[in-house]
C-alpha cells in the first residue's frame, strides 16, 4: 500500500539526520512501500498507521549492491 500523505506535509518533512534533506514516498526497491526515503542519505523511515516515524533509531540504513551498509561493515 502506498503512503498517502498530504502534499503540503510531505513538502515540509525532512530527514532528521544532520543534512535535513527532503523525503520521498516509498523505497528504491518498492515505490509503493509504506515508508519515506531520504533523498540525500538513503535512510528509509517507516510509516505506521499513516504516521511517519522519523526517528533515526527506527530508520533502515541504505545498503550497497554487495549487501553491506553504506556507512560501514
Image: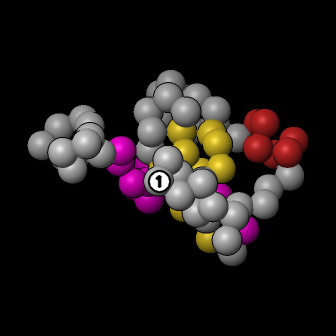
Q: Is residue 55 magenta?
A: yes
Q: Is residue 56 left or right of residue 22?
A: left
Q: Is residue 12 magenta?
A: no
The residue sitting at 18% across, 45% down in the picture is 66
Viewer-proximal residue among 38 and 14: 38
Q: Main secondary structure of the magenta part?
A: loop
Q: Residues within 10 Å of mark 1 (few under 14, many from 20)?
A: few
- Rendered image quadrant of residue 35: bottom right
> Which residue has dot 1 on it?
29
Which residue is the extreme one toward the left? 73
On-image quarter of the C terminus = top left
Vertical order, 1 against 7 (above or below): below
**SS at badge 1:** loop
| Residue 16: image location, x then y, percent | 54, 39
Q: How is the image coloured?
A: secondary structure
| Residue 55: image location, x then y, percent | 50, 52
- Rendered image quadrant of residue 70: top left
Magenta stretch: give its range: 50-62
Vertical order, 71 against 25 (above or below): above
| Residue 58: image location, x then y, percent | 44, 59
On-image quarter of the N terminus = bottom right
The residue sitting at 24% across, 35% down in the picture is 71
The residue sitting at 65% across, 50% down in the picture is 25
Q: Kindly tell me whether residue 35 is visible in this rendering.
A: no
Q: Is residue 31 left or right of residue 40?
A: right
Q: Is residue 59 left or right of residue 13?
A: left
Amino acid at each position: 500500500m502506498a503512503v498517502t500523505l498530504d502534499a503540503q506535509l510531505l513538502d515540509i518533512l525532512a530527514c532528521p539526520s544532520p543534512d535535513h534533506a527532503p523525503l520521498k514516498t516509498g523505497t528504491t526497491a518498492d515505490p509503493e512501500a509504506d515508508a519515506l526515503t531520504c533523498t540525500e542519505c538513503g535512510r528509509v523511515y517507516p510509516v505506521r498507521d499513516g504516521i511517519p516515524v522519523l526517528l533515526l533509531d527506527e530508520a533502515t540504513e541504505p545498503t550497497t549492491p554487495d549487501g553491506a551498509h553504506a556507512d560501514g561493515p
